[in-house]
Each structure stands twice: as structure tokens, then as C-alpha cells.
Image (cartoon, grey):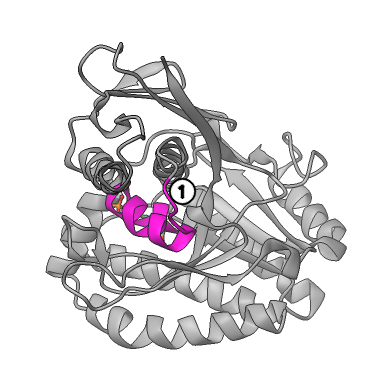
Amino acid sequence: EIHRASTTAPVNIAVIKYWGKRDPKLNLPTNSSLSVTLSQADLRTHTTASCSSSYPSSDSLLLNGSPQDVSGARTQACFRELRALRKKIEEQDGSLPRLSEMPLKIVSENNFPTAAGLASSAAGFAALVRAIANLYELPASPTELSRIARQGSGSACRSLFGGYVGWDQGSAADGSDSMAFEVAPAEHWPNMRAVILVVSAAKKGVSSTAGMQTTVATSSLFAARASETVPKRMQEMQKAIKEKDFETFAKVTMMDSNSFHATCLDTYPPIFYLNDVSRAAIKVVESINVAAGKIIAAYTFDAGPNAVVYYLEEKEKEVAGLFKAALGDKEGWSGKRGDAIQANSE
Ligand code: DP6
């Protein structure tokens, strides 16, 4: 007999960035963060988890058709935590099948092309954790699951919710209070839009895990960012989202992206995620805002050169028109909302 359950989890893009760990094993961050899921684009990982006593003895994971290594500490931590929760309910109810003792088979597919240049670990671990939780019929809330997904990849904890999601850094050494929370559902601000400007689909040079460790160890800007700048921005950002104040949302988003990349540059050896095309995109957003006489578009960049640009639906023509004029109409702004578009390949 094969037991099986499926789920999906969305990609999330941080507008207040997670960068720095106080505990690299548990992925406990040095600051809280906040993200928006790209719901119009509906970028997701779909995952099916199954288990059976007839499976080969070791756990396995297939991502977009290719086998992945599951022996890493992060994946193992997720498997271990979920099995322990299942074991508990099996011990309480002797009639339940002993799923916790069976090998797991995980099959994941991203519905977005690798060429979108998106880091998929957040949606990937979130979907993996929820699929297994469903398979095991665990009575766990998204908040509880976020604590487990965090151990797979920090940003994954924010993909257990849709819409506007915070990740509370917490202070407990065991990570029990470091988890995601909903700031507002996507429907709260239904005219919010995001497009991804694909500058390069190549895999990033310095992984976030390695990059943040070097930043924590060497950057002198980092301490002030973690202890002063981000806590203040977390408050401003949550207020802006609750009040649907786009100008503040946008300004804080852009400033936090700049602060994160400044911290990367201040790392030794320096980490460069932005390139000339990224900087051109920043200038285009600046000129869009100057032309409008107020802030109608915001950029943010993760650990790579691709821009995510936020704007409100009613400003689509203004934002799209200027982007087209500046970067050329390659594929995209006229295409479906939220589509990944190609600006300029390297
Ligand atoms: C720049 O979550 O990928 O995207 O915890 O080591 O897996 P690990 O790092 P990861 O880092 C994401 C960094 C970021 C900012 C963010 O998403 O908040």
C-alpha cells in the first residue's frame, strides 16, 4: 500500500531582507524579515509526498525530474521533525499505520521556468514540509510548520502563508519562537502587482548561506542594519501594508534592498549581486517615480541580479510604458501580469 498527499507552496520575495544567522544550524536569523508572495504570477512548487513499506529503504527526492541528495542536514532536519510528530500520534493511537517508519518518496515540480532566475528553495522546502505534514495527517498549523520549514531554508518559513508575511527572528536558543506570521492576506491589497525583470537566469555566484556568514563575520555596516535599521523598518512596513500606503511600502522596500546590497559590498571579500543591468533597472524605477511626481514603483533584489518591481494595477501603463521605452520591449510588460520577463541576458 502507498500512502500519498500533495500540496503547493508559493515563491516569496522579501521586501525586508533576511541576511545573517545567529545560529546557522537552525537557520535562526539576526533580524526579522517580511515578504510578499507573487500571487498573480502564481509561481509555485507542487509537491507530492508518499511513503510505503514496499519502497526501497532510503528516502528520496525528485525535483523537476532529477534526483536530489537528501542526506544534507537541512532536509534531514525536516524529515526528522515531521517523523517525530507523526510518531507521537502513532503512539497515542495504536491503530494508525506506522507511516513514520516507512521510507519517504518526495516528488516536486516548479511551475516556473528555471530561466526565471528565481531561488526556489523557499517554495521548495515549504511545499515539502506541508506535503509530508498532510501525508502524516499532522494537526499542525502553518505557524508550526513554518518552524520546521525554516530549518530547510530560512526564507521557506515565509512560504507557508500567502500574501504579506513576517518572520519573527525570535530570541530562544532552540528556535521555538522563530517563525512566520501573517501580516495580511493577499486579498487585503488586491491591486498590488509584481513583475520579475530577468537580468540573468544563471545561478548566483555566492550562495545566500555562505554570503550571510561572511557578512556577519566581516561587515561593519551589518550590526547597525540588524539591530537598528531593520527593527524600525519592520514596524514601518507592517503599518504601510495595513494602511495600504504604497509610497511608504515602496520606499521602505527600495531602501531595504539598497541596505542589504550595501552590506554585501561591505563584506570582505565583497559580494556583488547587482550588475550593470540591475543598476539600469534601478535608474528606470527612479525615473518612473520622478516622472509621476510620486512613488508608483519599487524595486527589490535578492541574492542575484534580477529585479522584482512592485506597483499598483492602476499604474501599470505608466510603469510598463517607461520600462519598455528604457529597456526595449523584449517579451514582457505587455504580457501577462506577474510574468517573468527578459530584460537583457548576460
Ligand atoms: C536575500 O533563505 O536562501 O533572499 O536560510 O541559508 O537557506 P538559507 O538562506 P535563504 O536566504 C534568502 C536571502 C534573501 C533575503 C530573503 O529572502 O529574506
**Quadrant of the rendered image holding ligand 1:** bottom left
What range is drawn magenta here? 138-157
Residue visible at 80% across and 63% down in the picture: 191
Residue toward you, 281 or 77: 77
Residue 142 vertical placement versus 51 (above, below) = below
**Which percent across, then down, holds residue 322?**
78, 57
**Which percent across, then down, holds residue 105?**
35, 22
Residue visible at 30% across and 47% down in the picture: 152
Q: Is residue 145 magenta?
A: yes
**Which percent across, then down, holds residue 39?**
67, 51
Q: Is residue 260 visible?
A: yes
The chief SS type of the magenta part is helix
Quadrant including the N terminus: top left
- Report helix, strand or loop for mark 1: loop
Q: Which residue is mark 1?
A: 305
Residue toward you, 101 or 240: 101
In the image, is 73 to the left or to the right of 304? left
The mark tally for this picture is 1
Residue visible at 39% across and 85% down in the picture: 231
Residue 233 vertical placement versus 158 (above, below) = below
Which of the 4 image quarters holds residue 125?
top left
In the image, is 158 to the left or to the right of 23? right
**Circle 1: is it few (<14), some (14-19), or many (20+) Cα within 10 Å?**
many
